[in-house]
Amino acid sequence: MAGTITSCCSSHGYRVIRIDNQLIMAHRLAWLYVHGELPSGEIDHINGDRSDNRLANLRLATRVQNNQNTKTRTDNTSGHKGVCFHKQAGRWMAYINASGKRTYLGLHNSKEEAAQAYAAAAQELHGEFARTEQ
């Protein structure tokens, strides 16, 4: 019926729609509707909101690029991506994962300084897919 909600959210926060008894992610259907074909790779939600399927919020991405744009993990204790407290040194350590390896970005006096080091490295290494907070 016109105007009724036909989707639900998956356990991972994505909107899904059932077609012929198969669940399909709504962002992939939006891409199909606009571009005339299902994407061969992944679709990244630019703002990180998995239920925001506006075309302006969707872009094609590789798995690596999609992972670079992830939000800060819920088990992160510093509140900043790529930042943790180095107990032995008594300072904040910054690091970034890129090209399959972890790169050390130094020890810093505050977590804000470490977060700035991560943000600069993320912008340089990840470009438009860099996400530094949330």
Image (cartoon, rainbow, N blue to C red):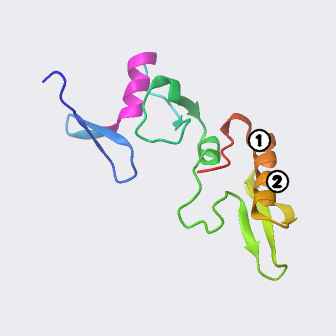
User: What is the chief secondary structure element of the magenta stretch?
Assistant: helix
Count of residue discs: 2
* Residue 112 pos. (x, y %): 76, 58
Magenta segment boundaries in residue numbering: 24-36
Residue 34 — which label? none
Q: In the rendered image, which residue does mark 1 sit on?
A: 123
Q: Position of residue 56 (x, y in %)?
A: 51, 24
Which residue type carries mark 1?
Answer: Gln
In this picture, residue 60 sits left or right of residue 123 = left
Q: Which comes sooner in the sequence, label 1 or label 2?
A: 2
Image: 112 above or below 20: below
For the point 75% across and 56% down, which residue is it?
115
Residue tagged 2: 117
Asked whether 71 falls inside the magenta stretch, the response is: no
Secondary element under disc 1, as helix, strand or loop, is helix
Around disc 2, counting alpha carbons within 10 Å, would you say few (fewer than 14), some (14 to 19), or many (20 or more)?
A: many
